[in-house]
Amino acid sequence: MQIPYCIRKLFGIKVYALVGRSGTGKSYRARLIAEKHGINLIIDDGLLIKGDNIIAGKSAKSEKVYLTAIKTALFDTVEHRTEVRNKLKEEQFTKILLIGTSEAMVQKIANRLHLPKPSKVIKIEDIVTEEEINQALKERATGKHVIPIPEVEVEKDYADIISGYISSTIEKGKGLFKRKKKIENTVVHPTFAPGEHPGHVSISKAALIQLVIHCVDEFDSSIKIKKIKIHSDSSGSYRIKLFLLASYKTQLSGKFHELQQYISQHLTRFTGIQIKEVNLEIENLKD
């Protein structure tokens, strides 16, 4: 007998989260973590993945514009999140893995997909070495991203951005029942990714301001921006300063540090520009 989705969500669904800054190898290790913990489903960059198959959603990596890619990764449109919610209701799963650049991001995804709050958060730096992270960052600098499914599956809908695949082997079981399993991930080169065109990447201040406003709203819509100052240097790096209005009820400790990281990581990820620093100043507290 199938257990109704609402009952499973209340008592039987455990949500895992894998978090870390962009380009540190989260998608590459997603299926390894899923195998280790017996996780049935993965949410990554707008896709709902089951085993070797995409079963719902659309990939942020297929978007032509970085702002649209951000929205896709966060299930911004009603149609996108409704499609994935409906598919989740059909699936008899007990565990799901959400991938994001911060805890705030995965919590927002969980809310939008009507999933419980993540109960186990895995930080990428806790499961890989600093050397592995640096190597992953070098790969990302060339514009390469990973989708945690085989190339043959990605080719159905996203053949135009495929640039290869990476395979790895894990051991399952113990003793006489030990066996090796090959896991294949697809390497893609999105249109919006840095490295698409050699040379300097630039963006107008007006466009950058709109992206910052969007990032803050996605992170926490209760935080309001009074003013934004943006400065760029001769190397093309940007310094951003935000003057904010925040509620007295807002927990200041820790939250604004997460916001700084959220803005920096998302702008770097979806534009290719270098963010040297993001400074926040609480100009006023409001009721």
Image (tube, rainbow, N blue to C red):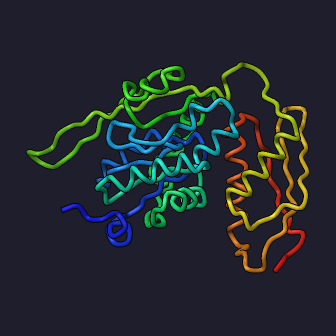
How many numbered discs?
0
Write down the quadrant of residue 192 in the picture: top right
One can see residue 202 in this view: yes
Does 242 sit left or right of 161 as displayed? right
Quick one: 233 or 212, which is closer to the camera?
A: 212
At 50% across and 41% down in the image, what residue appears? Answer: 25
Does 238 sit left or right of 55 as displayed? right
Does 64 sit left or right of 164 as displayed? right
Quick one: 174 or 54, which is closer to the camera?
A: 54
Residue 97's x, y, as percent?
42, 53
Quick one: 254 or 186, which is closer to the camera?
A: 186
Residue 110's x, y, as percent?
51, 59
Write down the quadrant of residue 231 in the picture: top right
Q: Is residue 143 above or below residue 124?
A: above
One can see residue 124 in this view: no
Residue 269's x, y, as percent?
66, 39
Q: Is residue 11 above or below residue 199?
A: below
At 43% across and 23% down in the image, what residue appears? Answer: 155
Q: Is residue 198 above or below residue 136?
A: above
Q: Is residue 234 above or below residue 101?
A: above
Residue 1's x, y, as percent?
18, 62
At 44% across and 67% down in the image, what residue appears? Answer: 119
Q: Quadrant of the C terminus?
A: bottom right
Residue at far left of view: 176
